[in-house]
Amino acid sequence: ETGVTQTPRHLVMGMTNKKSLKCEQHLGHNAMYWYKQSAKKPLELMFVYSLEERVENNSVPSRFSPECPNSSHLFLHLHTLQPEDSALYLCASSPALAGVGDTQYFGPGTRLTVL
Amino acid sequence: SQELEQSPQSLIVQEGKNLTINCTSSKTLYGLYWYKQKYGEGLIFLMMLQKGGEEKSHEKITAKLDEKKQQSSLHITASQPSHAGIYLCGADYGSGAGSYQLTFGKGTKLSVIP
């Protein structure tokens, strides 16, 4: 039990579909993150939220749209994805945004396959 | 070239053997995180090192950060099948943005043969 949950765990979608990934943290943290993990590539940071405000968007295509309605929930809305977007999407949270020692705790991930 | 290199890429060891995984940075680290990942699952936090020469242990896993703060090693003593997984190092380069700007290595896949 990591305290960070993600749903769904697996998702298969067509390129014209619209779907959303959900992340919830039960740790009382103030910062949340979306990462993409593709085969044979390092983890890529996509978005960072601190106290529901987006503080980072690492040149992510607009077909990925994050939403953070409160400090416990984070969504990733998906629209007209491409097959190369197939990957493991990981959510993480940390107590605060700044400062060494604020370890990020990860959820189990959503395995996304785009057909 | 990548800022953070892990070696080896994969490792197969017999149960009971010791092993070491390395993480080398092209520039000075502000902090270094070690995580373990089961295939297709999330990352489990293991340890964080910050000071040059620092060493931390948890059960049979020991992590060290060299004095120059550019290399870290993860050592497992008397490996068990439960140690199998992918080990990832994450670097905080202290850009002023805090720990959220982590740069990860590609990971080392560890298999332990019973």
Image: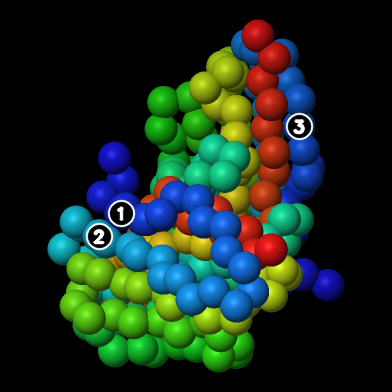
Residue at the image point whose x is 68% and y is 32% from the top: B110
Name the residue beneath numbered marker 2. A25
Residue A71's place in the image compared with B82, above or below, is below
Residue at the image point whose x is 16% and y is 63% from the top: A28
Name the residue beneath numbered marker 3. B11
Residue kind at label 1, given as amino acid type: Val
Residues at marks 3 and 2 touching, judged by CB atoms closer than 8 Å: no
Mark 2 belongs to which subunit?
A: A
**Circles 3 and 1 on the same subunit:** no
CA distance separating discs 2 and 1: 4 Å
Residues at marks 3 and 1 touching, judged by CB atoms closer than 8 Å: no
Residue kind at label 3, given as amino acid type: Leu
Mark 1 belongs to which subunit?
A: A
Horizontal side of B87 relative to A102 (left or right) equals: right
**Whole-percent x, y for residue B82 in the image:** 52, 22
- Determine the residue located farthest toward the right in the rendered image: B1
* SS state under label 3: strand
Name the front one of labels 3 and 1.
1
Displayed quadrant of residue B71: bottom right
Q: Which mark is residue B8?
A: none
Mark 2 or mark 1, earlier in chain: 1
Mark 3 belongs to which subunit?
A: B
CA distance separating discs 3 and 2: 33 Å
Name the residue beneath numbered marker 1. A4
**Whole-percent x, y for residue A48 in the image:** 41, 80
In the rendered image, which quarter contains the N terminus of chain A?
top left
Name the front one of labels 3 and 2.
2
Residues at marks 2 and 1 touching, judged by CB atoms closer than 8 Å: yes
Horizontal side of A68 relative to B72 (left or right) equals: left
Residue B103's place in the image compared with A46, above or below, is above
Residue at the image point whose x is 69% and y is 63% from the top: A115
Q: Nearer the viewer, residue A29 or A14?
A: A14
